[in-house]
Amino acid sequence: MSDSVPLQAIAEDVYTAPQLTPEAMASAAEAGFKAVLNNRPDFEGGPEQPTSAAMEAAAQAAGLAYAHLPVQGGYQSPEEIAQCAALLKSLPRPLLMFCRSGARSTKLYQQAISLDD
């Protein structure tokens, strides 16, 4: 990925990032990622935010698996956490999760993996 997208490793094969663009999907594939998980609701950041449909089309064009699990920043329900846990088991790795800043995806990941404890 380009130096302009800060990636945070949260596990050996899971990374988080702030809001990505459709153009970033090709870079993610080139960097070795196999899947992308979008945790941001459509239009949360206004009309200029890329939609999940645009992100999915770009991800698929780049050969990436794509999932959209939109969650709110301040609260993730037990159902959303369980959905994330299921996605973490099914999506190929390495996985790139993203939201507005990366913090929500990190928190969601940590809550999802705690279900296995």
Image: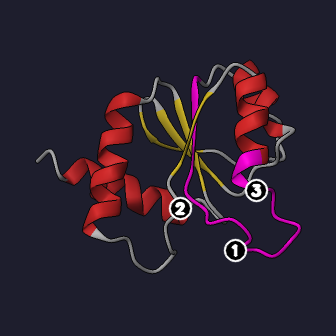
Secondary structure mostly seen in magenta is loop
Q: Position of residue 27 (x, y in %)?
A: 80, 29
Residue 59, image quadrant: top right
Q: In whole angstroms, how far apart are the C-alphas of marks 1 and 3?
A: 10 Å
Q: For numbered disc 3, what is the local secondary structure?
A: loop
Residue closest to the far left: 117
Q: From the viewer's side, name the closer residue of 15 and 90.
A: 90
Q: In whole angstroms, how far apart are the C-alphas of marks 1 and 2?
A: 10 Å
Q: For numbered disc 2, what is the local secondary structure?
A: loop
Horizontal side of residue 58 vs 113, given as left or right = right
Residue plotted at (61% across, 60% down): 99
Residue plotted at (64% across, 64% down): 101
Point out the stretch of residues depicted in magenta.
34-53
**Badge 3 local density, few (<14 within 10 Å), some, or many (20+)?**
some
Residue matched to label 1:
44
Residue matched to label 2:
70
Mark 3 and 2 residues: CB-CB less than 8 Å, in contact? no
Horizontal side of residue 4 vs 44, given as left or right = right
Residue 36, image quadrant: top right
Mark 1 and 3 residues: CB-CB less than 8 Å, in contact? no
Q: Position of residue 42 (x, y in %)?
A: 69, 65
Residue matched to label 3:
51
Q: Which amino acid type corresponds to the residue marked 3 in the rendered image? A: Thr
Q: Which amino acid type corresponds to the residue marked 2 in the rendered image? A: Pro
**Badge 2 local density, few (<14 within 10 Å), some, or many (20+)?**
some
Q: Position of residue 19 (x, y in %)?
A: 72, 57
- Tell me, yes or no, whether the highlighted magenta stretch contains residue 30: no
Q: From the viewer's side, name the closer residue of 117 and 46.
A: 46
How many badges with numbers are in the image?
Answer: 3
From what the image shows, is residue 70 above or below residue 85? below
Mark 1 and 2 residues: CB-CB less than 8 Å, in contact? yes
